[in-house]
Amino acid sequence: MTAARLPRLPAPKLGATTLRDVMFPWAIALATGLDYFDNSIFSFFTSYIAGGINSSTDELVWASSAYAVASVLGILQQQWWIERLGNRRYIGGSLFLFAAGAIAATLCESSFELALARGFQGYFIGPMMSACRILIQMRFTPQQRPRATRAFLNMILLGSALAPLIGGYLVASFGWRALFTSTAIAGAACGLFVLLAVPSSGRVQPEARGEAHFWPYIMFAFAQGALQIVMQQVRFQLFSSSPLLIMLTAAGLFALGWFVWHQWHHPRPLIRLHALREKPFRVGIMLYIAFYYVNTTLSFLVSRFLEGGLHYPVENAGRLTGCTSLVALAAAYLYFRYSARVAHKKWLIGSNASARPTKRSLTPASQPLRSSGNASMQRRTASTKSNSDNRASTIALPTRHSAASTAASLSDVSSHADCGSLRMSTLNRRGSAASTGLVRVSSQARKPQIRRVCAPPPP
């Protein structure tokens, strides 16, 4: 007897569709990672940027404020653009325009020009995380979603870790303008990758599109701008003795209250405030706020601590911070590997918060932070280069130690909320950007070399 011949199945073809399915999650992950890279690199090297444009403290903070306000406004209009352009054109176009803003920031010569350029960048790169997060929730099947989520979170951690590592080398070798040049090149490359890898989706027919919400949008923009101005100027002026700040606060709160009332009663609002009724969504909001506050604050303070307190060279400070931040990737790998065995994942967040190092643990015993006089300061500065390697082996930094567990747990918390309401989870992420503008800059004439001025230690 001869065995029956089985029909031969055609070999699978690795066509454009299959290749797009493979590259799709990495395209949106790279776009999100660029967002975090840009935020971290601006926060870490703020003092060098301020020295390059000869900006004062209250002038430089306008760049961070413009970025924060424009980012929130971009998040509000994100769905409006997607309904008319689609996800692929919106994300790709935003990345190209972000690259154009980075080129404009490279050519800036004053704080006003930098504020305009950063505001332009913030409007297009600010909604990137929420747009990509919703795309993962809507365009991937439950079987494909874990792989896309892992790539998404890993690129967030990698972008935050590479920012000081790459930025330190760029500032030391080419100057502060190379920071924006690098993000311009990365933005253009990611935009082209998105146009090739992301499928067309999200565009709807004209009769099914949402309203523009023009006046609510204007009122929210006014409220956001007024309150942001008050928060940044209260550092330099006494609030109770400034009628302008008091009036701006009252007007901003009134406009914000009207906006919340309007959106709560509107059948198709810009922000789905009704999602706040769900406890998992409220927890996710608080975790996002805590993560971005800690992340941005440490990115700014650690650079001041290393360069101003310990007098590390910029390249060594960036290398040390970036290498220690890469530990978060190992923590993310362990989470994805063994998180299924943990029944109550909230204990991971609590244990990580309790492991936060204190100020005393950040200061090595062999290196005092305060100087007894100009002579001792000069001797310490002269010996910085020879002792930098020894300091690197003794200091412990709290750079991104909470990033892995916090960001990974957010994927579990936010999955219980409605996908359309995920845009609201990023409205709080940009408020901490204005805190990166607290620097001390010399008022002398601009010099051709790189200048960085940090606040002296308290007497």
Image (cartoon, helix red, strand yellow):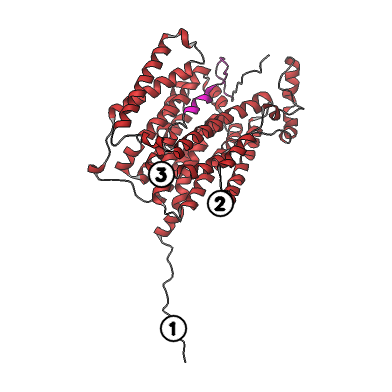
Between disc 3 and disc 2, the foreground one is 2
Type of amino acid under label 3: Ile
Type of amino acid under label 2: Ala
Mark 1: secondary structure = loop
Where residue 209 appears, as percent x and y from the top left, is: 26, 41
Q: Is residue 326 magenta?
A: no
Mark 3 crowd level (few <14, some 14–19, many ≥20, 10 Å Cα): some
Q: Tell me: residue 56, above or below residue 273.
A: above
Mark 2: secondary structure = helix
Q: Which residue is mark 2?
A: 340
Q: Which residue is mark 1?
A: 5
Reading the chain from its start, which is encountered first: label 3 or label 2? 3
The image quadrant of residue 144 is bottom left
Reading the chain from its start, which is encountered first: label 1 or label 3? 1
Q: Which residue is mark 3?
A: 134
**Extreme residue in the top direction:** 241
Q: In the rendered structure, which segment of residues is drawn in magenta?
A: 431-449
